[in-house]
Each structure stands twice: as structure tokens, then as C-alpha cells.
Amino acid sequence: MRRLLPYLAYLKPVRGHFILALLCALIYGAANGVGFPYMVDKVLPKIFEPTAARLTGLELLLLALWMPTVFTVRGVSGYFNTYLIQYCGVRILEALRLDFFRKLQVLPLSFFQRQNSGDLMSRALSDANQLQHTLTALSNEIFKQPATLIGSIGFLVYKAYNERGIILVLVCMAVIPLCVLPIRFIGKKLARRAKQVQSELGSASDVLNENLSAAREIRAFGLEEREVGRFSAVTGNLITYQMKAVKYAKALNPAIEIISGVGISVTLVYAYRANIPWNSFFAILMALYASYEPIKKLGALSNDTRRGVAALDRLEMVLNAPVDIADPAQPVTVGRLQGKVAFNNVTFAYKAGAPALRDVTLSIPAGTTCALVGPSGAGKSTFANLVPRFYDATQGTISIDDIDVRAMRLADLRANIALVSQEAILFKDTIYNNLLLGRADATENEVHQAARDAFADDFIRSLPHGYDTVVGERGATLSGGQRQRIALARAFLRNAPILVLDEATSALDSESEAAIQQALKKLVVGKTVLIIAHRFSTIRDASMILVFDRGHVTDCGSHAELYARNPLYKALFDGQNQS
Ligand SMILES: Nc1ncnc2c1ncn2[C@@H]1O[C@H](COP(=O)(O)OP(=O)(O)O)[C@@H](O)[C@H]1O
Ligand SMILES: [Mg+2]
């Protein structure tokens, strides 16, 4: 439970509601724990005792009203307590999800390569939900039930002590400590199950997520049955763990009821022996019963808490994940950079011990078009991804205009870089807004000019709503070439001094590619360009070519120089020109 306390801070914005809810809980507790036993003790005898005085009509009415009054007070306070607490719970959930989502925005890319997106989704939705449930239940019952318990035990002690002294009190209370045993035992079992359930939910949403994103491949390869099998396997596991959790959770109430039944029967026997009048005895019974109820609820609450802590563990995996790529404490202020990119003894490994880039030292003068060439897996994309700090070098430094990239604010650094990769991702929005992502403050004219420069204007205007056409998720309603041209138009708009083109033309048909080549010629002017391209036609004009081989940069020169002296380069070039 201590684990959950820091998160009660989320209640701050709704403290007014929360305090009101607590007041209602106290009223509820008093009505519940004292109201009924008191009625049995004091009201019923006036009506049923043969020796009682005759009642006037008004007195009878007042006595008869006792019951509906207790019910009304309890009902109304219970209602407002629940309503207000639910309101607080929903607000907690909202704040928590937002914190979670905000954290996802700043985590380094490497985090997402380690985690499955379906599992992250399940954490954001289902675990946050579980935690909300727990916090609500906790804040709801944690005052209401103890209030009831104290009310009823107080009444019990008072009553029993007045009847027969301390012995009767002890008899009545004897079994209460016994109730703690099943609460503890079941709680421990449940904690493990709860975590398994949440993690199975994560696996199920992984499978679902992967399935949805590969709808085409599944049909093409005839994987439908295999996918159904995979999904049914994870949901099967989910059900198994859920039922195990139910098995323990639902055993708690009967266990406590049986124990309290024993307590009541012991009291009954003692009361008979001791000749306690029936109304006192019933009042004691009611108070006893009223005190077992909160124990049952608090037991269930302890189970809820364990589920909540399991969910919290899963949320904290994200909330507390280190953000190791972040702004420096004292950033160097940079505006628009010139674009001289230098690597100094840079080694980088995705996984310790297997560097993807080894001891790279080189300098690319501002305004140079620099092509990166090498077999697939040689480290070209890795090299390009280190410049905008998608990853940080394991050793060595990377600088732009002789300023270490780690000394700049991330936003400043990245504002100086435009990136076009093989897969152009669009958001589900209008084409115009998608273009505007390149530079949020661009004017309409600039947006249109950028589209013209990227040879995208014509096809955009031919769409049913032109620039206001909404594209599907990830841009699914456009062709690859069209998406790529929109990505290029963004790069035109961004007009950053450093341009990274990572296989930007690889996935295109030859018509699109011709248009994009044209666009690129204009785009690269005056910029430092890192270009990774499939086709040598794109790169032979580059003024600087770097040859990558198994993480090393093995050579650097112009096309003519490298073709003459570098066997790997010659082999790659000839291999492509033959085919
Ligand atoms: N996210 C990643 N996690 C782990 N290893 C990776 C990751 N990306 C690339 N690698 C590995 O790093 C090496 C270089 O990859 P990459 O830079 O993408 O090559 P290239 O772009 O030249 O084809 C390869 O061995 C690849 O398997
Ligand atoms: Mg690559």
C-alpha cells in the first residue's frame, strides 16, 4: 500500500471533491455501524416489549421513521461518496495516462526497440485502468469501512460491557483476529496472479497489434489460421490466469463469513447461558455483523491493492525508465548551424559487445553532398542516426560546427536536420497539415511552393479535396511514391542546413524516382547532405563518398578515385550496373 501513496498526489486538483467524499464516508460509517444496532436496542423494545408503555400515534410514527431515516442518511451519503470518489478516480486515470503518454514522447528510440508496442498499449490502457480502479476502491473504502468498523465495534463494546462486563466483549471479538489469516494468505496468492494476468493482456495486445499491422502479408502468405492459433493461445493463457485470480479472490468472502459465523454462534451460546435479554442480544449481533462486513470489504480491498500494485509495477517500468537522451543541464545556444559534421573516434553498439560502428573519425565540410555506400548492415543508417541523437555514441564525440551534439538542446539540434527515410509516415490528417509538420509556421504559399518543388503539387491537386484531402492512417490511401514526395516537400519546407536521405528513393517505381531525383537536385543545394541510396545513379555525383564495411569507414573519395582504388566499391558498383 505504501507503494500507492505517492500517486495520491494525483488527487490534488480534485481535493475539494475528495474531502467532501470523505465527509460522506464518515456519515455513511456512522449510519451503518451504529444506526441499525441502536434501532434494535432502543427502538424495537418500545414497540414489542409487553411491559412497554402504550405509544401515542405521534410516538409510533417517530419510531417507525427511524428505519427509513437511517436508510436515507446511509443511502444519500453512500451515493455522494461513491459519485465523488468515481469523479476523482477518473481524473486520476486521465492524469496518469497523460504522464505515461508524455513519457513515451521523450523516451529514446532504443526503448521502443526493446519493448513491444502492443504491450505498451496494454500498459497505457488496461494497467492504468486497473490502477484507477484500485485507487478509487482504496480511497473509497479506506475511510468508509474503518468508520463503519469503529462505529460498530464502539457500540458493541459499550453494549456488551454494560450487559455482562468485559468477558462478553472478549467473546464477541475473539474471532476478529482470525479473519486476518485468510486475508493475508489469499492476498499473497493473488498478487502473483494479478501480475500474470496483466502481462498476458500485454501479450494478447502484442499479437493483435502485430496482426493488424500485417493485414496484407497475412493474406498474401495465407497465414490466417496460424494467426488465429497464435491469438487463441494467448487468450487461452489469459483465461487460465484470470480464473486462477478469481479462484483466490472469490474465496475470501466465504472464508470470512464462516469465521464470523463461528464467532456469532459462540456469542449465542454464551448469551443463552448468561441470560442476556433478547433485544440486547440482537443489538450485539447486529453490531457484530456490522463489524464483520467492513473486515470482509477491507480484505477485498487488500486484494484490490495487490492488483493495483501489479499494474503500477508495469506502469512504472515506463514512468521510471531512464531518459538517457535528454537536454544537457547547461545547453549551448545555437541558432541555424552551418552544417559541418564531424565524427571523432566514434564507436557505437546497439548491444554491448557488438559494435555497429567502430572508431569512426571523419569530417564532412558544410555544404557537401556526402554519399554513404556499403553492403547492407555495414552501419550506414547507424551513422546517419547518430547525428540527430536518435542514439548516443558509446564512445567518441559527434559535433556540428565544432559543437558537441550533446551540448545542444535536442530541439535546437533537430531543428537543424531534415530527415527523409525509406518509409515516409503520414498522420491521419489533411495533406496540408501533414506538409506543415515540416515547419509549423510556414505560410500557405510556402507550403504550395514546397509541394511544387517536390513534384507533389500536381497529384495533390488531382485528389478529390486537393490539399484538404484526409489521408488514411500512416498515409495508407496514398502510393509509396506519393508519400515520398510529401516527405520531400516537408524537407523543402524545413529548409534545414543538414539533410539526411536514408534510402529515400529505394522503394519507388522508376517514374516516381525520376521525379524525386529532379526534386533532390534542387533540395540539396547549399546543404550538408548525408545520402544513403540504393542506386549508384543517385550517388556518383556526390562530392564525397564514404565506404562502409562491417562498421568501419574504410575509404573516402570521389567516385572516380574509389572506383580506381577500392575493390569493395568497385564490386558494389559493377554488381549493380550488370543487373
Ligand atoms: N535497432 C537495432 N538494434 C540492434 N541492432 C541493430 C539495430 N539497427 C541496426 N542494427 C545492426 O547494426 C548493424 C548496422 O545496421 P545499419 O546501420 O542499419 O546498416 P545499413 O544501414 O548499412 O544497412 C547491423 O548489423 C544491424 O543488424
Ligand atoms: Mg540502412
Image: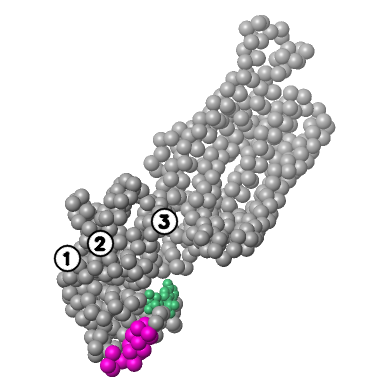
Binning the other alpha carbons within 10 Å of mark 2 as few (below 14), some (14 to 19) or many (20 upward) gives many
The foreground one among 165 and 17 is 17
Query: Residue 336 — which label?
Result: 1
Does label 1 or label 3 sit earlier along the sequence?
1
Q: Within the image, what quadrant is residue 36 found in?
A: top right
Q: Which residue is mark 2?
A: 454
Q: Is residue 515 left or right of residue 204?
A: left
Q: Residue furthest top?
A: 56
428 or 132, nearer to the observer: 428
Q: Are marks 1 and 2 in contact (CB under 8 Å)?
A: no
| Mark 3 residue element | loop
**What's the distance in space between the residues labelled 1 and 2, CA to CA?**
23 Å
Mark drawn on residue 476: 3
* Main secondary structure along the magenta-highlighted residues: helix
Q: Tally the numbered discs.
A: 3
- Asked whether the viewer can see residue 433, the reply is no
Name the amino acid, label 3. Ala
Query: N-terminal of the two: label 2 or label 3?
Result: 2
Q: Say which of 314 and 448 sits in front.
A: 448
Q: Is residue 187 above or below residue 33?
A: below
